[in-house]
Image (cartoon, rainbow, N blue to C red):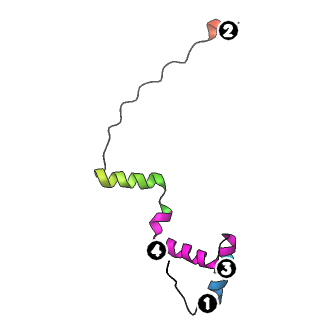
């Protein structure tokens, strides 16, 4: 891992980083790394598995239009009246 030093950070920003780190139960360094990852790689945090797989399939196939089969009427419900006493 590399080390990054940032100078002239506003006190309000530093305070908010400390608050966020406490909320997330981590160090300020970890909080800053998390924020930087979210800012630099936004699709990684926004894409859920289903959306990711959908996107991969679209890219591989170019998208496919499927014909939907005709719907049939539902079967009739059973008649239990002859067994009722």
**Magenta segment, which residues?**
21-45
- Which residue position is annotated with label 1? 10
Q: What residue lies at 49% left-to-right and 74% top-to-bottom?
A: 39
Residue 24 place in picture, x, y as percent: 66, 69
> Which tag, 1 or 2, sits closer to the chain's start?
1
Label 1 – label 2 distance at C-alpha: 80 Å
Question: Between tags 1 and 2, which lies in front?
Answer: 1
Q: Does the magenta stretch include residue 31?
A: yes
Majority secondary structure of magenta residues: helix
Mark 2 is surrounded, within 10 Å at the Cα level, by few (under 14), some (14 to 19) or many (20 or more) other residues, namely: few
Q: Is residue 61 above or below residue 15?
A: above
Residue located at (44% from left, 54% from top): 51
Q: Residues within 10 Å of mark 3 (few under 14, many from 20)?
A: some
Residue at numbered disc 3 = 18
Q: Residues within 10 Å of mark 1 (few under 14, many from 20)?
A: few
The local secondary structure at tag 3 comes to helix
- Give the alpha-carbon distance from disc 1 to disc 3, as whole Å: 13 Å
Q: Residue 40 carries which label?
A: 4
């Amino acid at each position: 891992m590399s080390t990054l030093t940032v100078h002239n950070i506003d006190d309000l920003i530093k305070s908010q980083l400390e608050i966020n780190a406490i909320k997330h139960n981590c160090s300020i360094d970890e909080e800053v790394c998390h924020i930087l990852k979210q800012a630099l790689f936004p699709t990684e945090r926004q894409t859920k598995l289903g959306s990711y797989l959908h996107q991969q399939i679209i890219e591989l196939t170019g998208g496919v239009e499927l014909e939907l089969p005709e719907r049939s009427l539902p079967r009739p419900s059973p008649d239990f009246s002859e067994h009722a006493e």
